[in-house]
Amino acid sequence: MTLKIYNTATRKKELFQPIDPDCIKMYVCGPTVYNLVHIGNARPVVVFDTLFRLLNSLYPQVIYARNITDIDDKIMKAAVEQGRSIGELSSYFAEQYGLDMAELNTLEPTIVPYATDHIDEMLAMIQALIERGHAYEAEGHVLFDVKSMSDYGKLSNRALEDMLEGARVEVASYKRYGGDFVLWKPSNDDEPGWSSAWGRGRPGWHLECSAMIEKHLGNTIDIHGGGRDLIFPHHENELAQSQCAHDGEQYVRYWMHNGYINIDGEKMSKSLGNFRTVRELLERYPGEVIRFALLSAQYRSGLDFSYELLEQSKSSLDSLYSALRKTNTVIAGAVELNDNPGYIALLDDLNTPLAISELHQLAKILNKPEEYSEQQLFETKATMLQLGSLMGLLQAEPEAWFQGDTDEDSTWIEDAIAARQQAKLDKQYARADEIRQELKAKGIVLEDSREGTKWRRE
RNA sequence: GGCGCGGUGGCAGAGUGGUCAUGCAGCGGACUGCAACUCCGUUAACGCCGGUUCGAUUCCGACCCGCGCCUCCA
């Protein structure tokens, strides 16, 4: 089984060849924790969670790190505005982030490193860069000297001059060259800071990922992921720092970037203010519906997010779960996925829409149990559940999916169903319909079948 | 200005040089006391103009339109 990955660095789909097949190393850029995350932040989490699951199906061990950025000017600003300490604010939103992501059926990464726990490593990396002539100190700042790196800009495919021509920001006076970026910057007394050889200050944004990868995963990793908007400057700069600090050693073998979530054709972003938080979506839809919506397009393409998309996702999931519910008596187990078209689709640069279409094909079989042998049904159901599991889908009990919170007392529904059953036996069809209507008004839909009446919430 | 992505049926979304994506929605039928689920059938698409080809949605070229990065951003 071979995995193919589109590599941003080469702009081609490539065969994935791990550094060490016994242990895959993957890093994904996590959030800066100063508010609730929006659905655009959730896309890479779900996408790379799916990749994590897929890699786990192929290799014995996968180390997946996803960081938390808990020191940053945006956090400092939010803390001042809200009158809270930085630590309090960042740990609160880090926790909320964890809760939201768990609702989306994402697995906990192997490592969740925090930036502020790695200041020493960052300082060491700055030192290494200065020693190698790739960084310089100026007015309390330490800057990376991009001209000291011959192929700076290669990842994002742009030339230095071109970038500066289009630049919309003024170049700080202490920079030797406009493209140089901050490794360390000074802090005022009322700002958070750490003491260093270059004075009390705090790290530049790009540095943490480089330092944490070095510490937890090593000089070279297999996969580095994140949103497309991170390609430049974040990943370009990470790459520059790490490679230069490590005497040119390759930093990342496969760079992967997901496309944007759009609203009405425009990129969703915090700065545009056109975002939907995961939290508000979760108030209206189960996490699995949101996850399904995120996986309904291939990860590199844009995805227009709308309530219509969520409705369609819900309907699709209903129909898949309905097939599973129909075959409740078939107990699924482990099965070989290798030849399954859905699995092959996932291995082809995570073609989740194609894999989902395969789920529907499998459901079609389950919906006609009388036409298949028990063995065929067993295999079909097992395949469906396993394929679903690779995408973090279909893992709920069908009954729970349709009936919602099991904590809630549902005996009144059962009672009403029993009363209707009696009315039917008595041929009191008007009364039976009345009960159906009453339940419908409360959002309960009844489904009669040979085995009796089932119910679900709308 | 530089670099890049995309335009597929009502909606979402794969894919391919020549029979079908798939799902949601719609329509017709079956099942049902009614309904829902499901099943069967069905409608409908490849931005525009040229070129290559026996044949192009798929390859090539021009054009139009939309979007993104170059600044914090997933």
Image: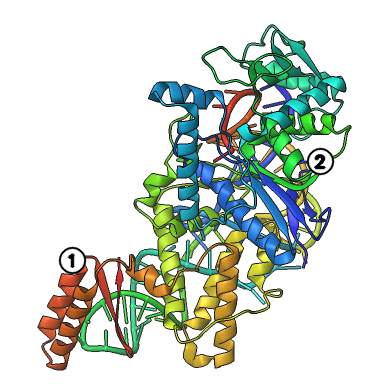
Q: Is residue A410 left or right of residue A152?
A: left
Query: What residue do we see at 61% from left, 32% from top?
Result: A116
In the image, residue A77 above or below residue A26: above
Secondary structure found at label 1: helix
Asked if marks 1 and 2 touch (Cβ < 8 Å), the reply is no
Question: Crowdedness of circle 2 by 10 Å Cα count: few (<14), some, many (20+)?
Answer: some
Looking at the image, what colour scheme do you see? rainbow
As shown in the figure, which amino acid type bears the numbered disc 2?
Asn
Q: In front here: A50 or A406?
A: A406
List x then y, in percent, for residue A362: 55, 77
In the image, residue A82 above or below residue A18: above
Give the position of the N terminus of chain A as an image quadrant: bottom right
Q: Residue furthest front?
A: A195
Q: Is residue A279 left or right of residue A428?
A: right
Q: In front here: A231 or A117?
A: A117
List x then y, in percent, for residue A184: 68, 20
Judging by the rendered image, the residue that carries numbered circle 1 is: A441
Q: How many marks?
A: 2
In the image, residue B50 above or below residue A423: above
Query: In which image quadrant can residue A274 be found?
Result: top left
Q: In front here: A218 or B4?
A: A218
As shown in the figure, which amino acid type bears the numbered disc 1?
Ala
In the image, residue A191 above or below residue A289: above
The alpha-carbon separation of the residues under discs 1 and 2 comes to 61 Å
Disc 1 vs disc 2: which is toward the camera?
2
Query: In which image quadrant can residue A163 be found?
Result: top right
Q: Which numbered circle lies on residue A219? A: 2
